[in-house]
Amino acid sequence: MKKIVFVGVAAALFTGAAVAAPVQWAGNGHWYEYVAGPVTWDGALSGAASMSHLGQPGYLATITSEAEQVFLQSQGWSLSWVGGSDRETEGVWKWIAGPEAGQAFWDHGTTLIYSAWGSGEPNDYNGGEDYLQFNWGGNGPNVNAWNDHGGPGSSYAYSHGYVVEYGGVVPEPETYALMLAGLGALGAVARRRKAA
């Protein structure tokens, strides 16, 4: 038994597998899940998009309020990628995934919606820091804050785990078809039991 558990943990660590079951935040009803790295930001973006929970497609998390930030910090997850980037236009940070995709949240020093940057961040240090990192230890009073970090194509690429968010995205039509077929099957079983 111990050997099987160890192999499962090792597989999760080396394949970018989820570390724990998704947790739900009552503030918006969305579910969140931490996936261990190492993975680049682009790998996290595509990895999150390939996941689903309770019929909801996954996306690299978007953090749009202080309450959501506090909830995610309380999970004790490691340094993680989330779904913001300024690779399109330096200094204009946008959400790249989820229902907020394309929405700018920070523009050259001005918070447009919500941000939780660490002291002196974002700073595009050494160029190519175009990807949003969550739970950065950082300096100054805002520990567990946001940081801009490098990614593929930068002079130094970083790999971390990432946070997947489920909710706020309408599932594909085939998801509804499967759900309706399942409900119909349950109804048929219930009718048979009642008739017997």
Image: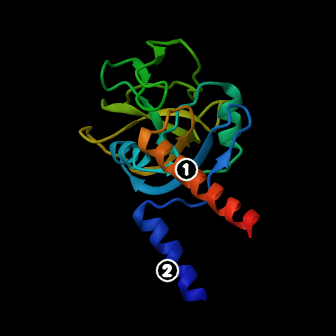
Q: Between tags 1 and 2, which lies in front?
A: 1
Label annotation for residue 83: none
Q: Residue 166, image x and y in percent?
A: 55, 41
Question: In 3D space, how far apart are the residues under numbered discs 1 and 2 (Cα atoms)?
Answer: 24 Å
In this picture, residue 162 sits left or right of residue 91:
right
- Residue 173: give x, y in percent of width and height: 43, 38
* Rendered view: 34 above or below 2: above
Q: Position of residue 69 (x, y in %)?
A: 65, 33
- Where, quadrant-wise, is the C terminus in this rendering? bottom right
Categorize mark 2 by other alpha carbons within 10 Å: few (<14), some (14-19), many (20+): few
Q: Is residue 186 above or below residue 73?
A: below
Q: Residue at x 67, y 41 (%)?
A: 73
Contact between labelled residues 2 and 1, with CB atoms less than 8 Å apart: no
Quadrant into which the N terminus falls: bottom right
Residue 45: x and y in percent read: 39, 42
Q: Viewer-proximal residue, 179 or 134?
A: 179
* Mark 1 burial class by Cα count in 10 Å: few <14, some 14-19, many 20+: some
- Residue type (three-letter) at the residue carrying disc 2: Val
- Asked if residue 172 lies left or right of residue 185, the reply is left
Residue 72 visible somewhere in the drawing:
yes
Mark drawn on residue 53 = 1
Q: Which residue is mark 2?
A: 7
| Three-letter code, disc 1 | His
Q: Judging from the image, what secondary structure is the residue with disc 1 in?
A: strand
